[in-house]
Amino acid sequence: MSKHSKRERDYVTLKIPPELAKEIDEIIKNHPELGYRSRAEFVKEAIRKHILTHFSKE
């Protein structure tokens, strides 16, 4: 059996420029009212919103 859990295998890794990562970190730090606990959480929601905005069927 693999040393990684099933949950870890269900994800892929994406790379973003360091400047963008810093910007996301600042948003998370300076706006706790938004409720993001991590970069991953922020990015997942941003991608979902982008897909819904630009590619959802009406």
Image (cartoon, helix red, strand yellow):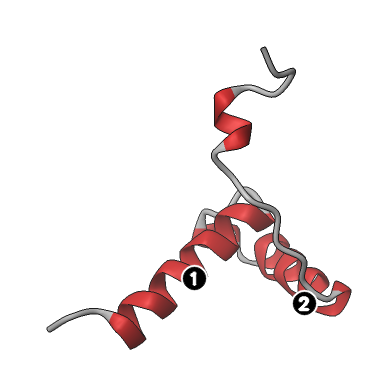
Q: Is residue 28 left or right of residue 57?
A: right
Q: Nearer the viewer, residue 56 or 42?
A: 56
Residue lying furthest top: 1
Badge number at residue 27: none
Q: Identify which residue is drawn at 43% across, 79% down.
A: 50
Real-space Cα distance between discs 1 and 2? 14 Å
Circle 2: element type: helix
Circle 1: element type: helix
Which residue is tagged 2? 20
Q: Amino acid at mark 1?
A: Ile
Q: Identify which residue is drawn at 52% across, 54% down.
A: 35
Q: Is residue 6 left or right of residue 54?
A: right
Q: Is residue 54 left or right of residue 57?
A: right
Name above or below for residue 8 compared with residue 4: below
Q: Amino acid at mark 2?
A: Leu
Which residue is tagged 1? 47
Query: Few, some or many C-alpha atoms within 10 Å of disc 1 (few <14, some 14-19, many ≥20)?
Result: few
Residue lying furthest right: 18
Q: Nearer the viewer, residue 28 or 9?
A: 9
Q: Identify which residue is drawn at 40% across, 73% down.
A: 49
Residue lying furthest bottom: 54
